[in-house]
Image (cartoon, helix red, strand yellow):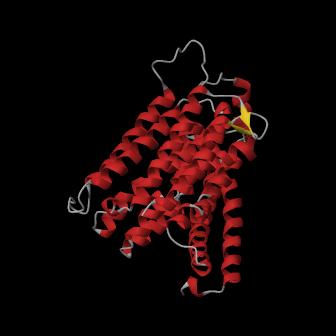
Amino acid sequence: MDISALSLPVLAVIFMAAAVAIWFAGIKVSDTTDTLSKHFGLGEALGGMIILAVVTNLPEMVIVITAALKNDLGLAIGNILGGIALQTVVLVVLDTFGLGKKDPLTYKAVSLVLVLEGVLVLAVLSLVVMGHQLPAKLIFWHITPGSFLIFAVWMACVKIISKAKKDLPWVTKDAPGPQQKTPDKNSNKQDHRQQKPIRKTIIVFMIAALITLVAGVALEISSDAIAKQIGMQGVLFGATVLAAATSLPEVSTGLASVKLKDYDLAISDIFGGNAFLPVLFLIATLISGKAILPTAQKSDIYLTGLGMLLTTIYIYGLIFRPRKQILHMGIDSFLVLIIYFLGIGGLFFIS
């Protein structure tokens, strides 16, 4: 059945139902990810980067795989690169509505691992730009140099970041710095007593992830169909409406993480998701047998650069941790919001 043939009211109901399902599933995903991260010793930052980021991007994975099977390379590229910038703006939402007057989000986050994750986003997106410049004929066994390097760099950096969680050599170990939390034996015992049985946690996590996957795909397809019926199409739709719809899992899990005071987990989910999405180029290339990165449009690369710029601002925020707020958000979030809207405006001048 072609969902685009449905009437606008029916599509709106599907969209709203999927949004509600994602919202509540995201709360459970965030809660269980926090428990699993502690159980397996991943920590909030690494847990957000690996577990939470992958789960919240399950809908994008399905859409990219489906697009690759249909040889719809434009849809695959748009789903991978189109929403990275707006997904970064989710941190503005978490900063403004999750914390409000309390403190900026980057001030509350106290892990330098988040800085490394932000640098990983920049590294992966720079490879996207470089891979775009390579000729499409440069492909061997359904693998292009660009897509392979993105995957290799992502894997290597995940391993490095995992090691950094345990030991950063230049940090004085005698006195805990901003990235270290003084251990509290009593609180650790209390956390251990309060932890749910791990088997039950895993089951809840898997059910919530499945709901996120199914509802996320329904959200993307219905929003695309709605846009076509109201006459809003193209890159602007992908970078705004569709990107906002696909970022709903991150908003839900992020606000839930902030409520749990897992600020590192909230930021890591966004950075981790943005770093993971370009890895899907390798999967799409393997499936389609075509070099996908070289076919990216100017607007795709433009949005990639915008995502890099917004990530850089938050990296600076995580390092300097400014406490001043503007309109209930940190200075870094305020700058990100302004630059994002200016950047989206620039799409109108790209031919």
**Residue 205: horizontal and vertical position, in percent?**
62, 55
**Residue 105: horizontal and vertical position, in percent?**
67, 37
Question: Can residue 77 be spotted in the picture?
Answer: yes
Q: Nearer the viewer, residue 202 or 262?
A: 262
Q: Nearer the viewer, residue 141 or 192?
A: 141
Question: Can residue 41 be spotted in the picture?
Answer: no
In the image, is residue 135 above or below residue 17? above
In the image, is residue 329 above or below residue 163? below
In the image, is residue 82 above or below residue 330? below
**Residue 232: horizontal and vertical position, in percent?**
58, 73
Point 31% across, 64% down: residue: 286
Is 284 left, or right, of 210 in this rendering? Answer: left
Q: Farthest residue in the front direction? A: 349
Point 57% across, 54% down: residue: 86
Is 293 left, or right, of 219 in this rendering? Answer: left
For the C terminus, the quadrant is: bottom left
For the N terminus, the quadrant is: bottom right
In the image, is residue 123 above or below residue 4? above
Q: Nearer the viewer, residue 103 or 250?
A: 103
Q: Farthest residue in the right direction? A: 101
Q: Nearer the viewer, residue 203 or 242?
A: 242
Point 66% across, 45% down: residue: 92
Which image quarter: residue 27? bottom right
**Residue 145: horizontal and vertical position, in percent?**
26, 52
